[in-house]
Amino acid sequence: MNKPPLDIIDLARQLVAIPSVTGEEGALADFLRERLTALGFTVTEQAVEGRRRNILALSGPTPRVILCTHQDTVPPFIPLSEDEGHLYGRGSCDAKGIMASLVGAAAGLPPEIRAACGLLFLVGEETDSLGAEKANGLNLTPDFIIVGEPTENKLGLGHKGFITVRLEARGKKAHSGYPHLGESAVLKLLDALQRARGLEFGQDRVLGGSTLNIGRVEGGVAANVVPDRAWAEISIRSTGPSAAILDEIKTVVGGEVEVDVLSVSEPQTLFTVPGFETVVLAYGTDIPYLRALGRPLLLGPGSILDAHIDGERMSKAQMRESVPLYQKLVRQLLALPDAGGGS
């Protein structure tokens, strides 16, 4: 394999040092435009919202393979630090270390192979995948898109879907000494949540079972007031069709509790090739939203267990190992018959 022509660890340092919490990716897009142009790529900026832009970098007019990850991070920003084995800081694992590896892999390919590849860096993956939705409008018809997320350098067989639902209960205020004069929204909500916890959504042969998480609960105004309003947000990592799961939730918790569906993405079965260790992932990605950009694959250095935490970190060794893995994957995909673009 070709040695990458740039220091990917140093590039990752620069990327992590730039804050890019979702909604504030503008400065990172500026940096990517300048750095990728300097590396010889033709860079196109796709406006998404305000200064937020998707960044597309090409070495040829008709890429068959797109290497893709996201610019944004979860809050809050955590400055860069490092030791001998790891980079630390917000986005080091999810997904700026991966971004540096993708750039190193693409830049290190021979010109004739590099011309068949592109780099695509999206905004908004951590919330609503707005950048991924917008990217479907790019004038591209690749056969494959390799999405970079932390998989410990294993090729993803599939990942779960993600459903977010808000449950809201309403009641009637009263003095807590006379609860019979009121109607507790909190009690209604607790009953609904308990019923939701009892749901079973079945098993998928590859992805396993769906899981439910009660992520937020809020209600009432004071301990001595019967609450007239309470709400919760729940999420389901789904392994079956979202419509069926939502029907079950609405049936079980409906009636006294309002159900508002905030987001839905379907579970994904991913494209694979031989010669890679494989894994099934419980988290979601931009893949369900990248419908026009080819058959999806999922691979990246780092562990998802090191993402989204105060001590977020990325293994320098896994970053270095990922570069020839990405290059191997690109070569194998380009050796397959032309699929004519799209998914």
Image: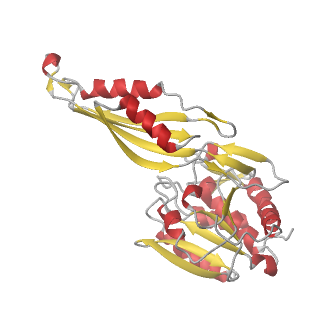
Residue 51 lies in quadrant: bottom left
Residue 272 lies in quadrant: bottom right
Evaluate whether residue 49 shows in this view. yes
Residue 25 at what x, y percent from top left?
Answer: 48, 66
Residue 148 at what x, y percent from top left?
Answer: 66, 58
282 sits to left or right of 243: right
Evaluate whether residue 310 shows in this view. no
Residue 274 lies in quadrant: bottom right
Which of the pair 291/34 is nearer the observer? 291
Which of the pair 11/25 is nearer the observer? 25
- In the rendered image of this protein, does residue 251 appear above or below residue 235? above
Residue 308 at what x, y percent from top left?
Answer: 55, 47
x 55%, y 40%: residue: 238
- In the rendered image of this protein, does residue 246 appear above or below residue 122? above
Q: Check the image and tell me how it is coloured.
A: secondary structure
Residue 84 at what x, y percent from top left?
Answer: 74, 53
Image quarter where the C terminus lies is bottom right
x 49%, y 27%: residue: 199
Image quarter where the N terminus lies is bottom right
321 sits to left or right of 250: right
- Total numbered circles: 0
Which of the pair 330/97 is nearer the observer? 330
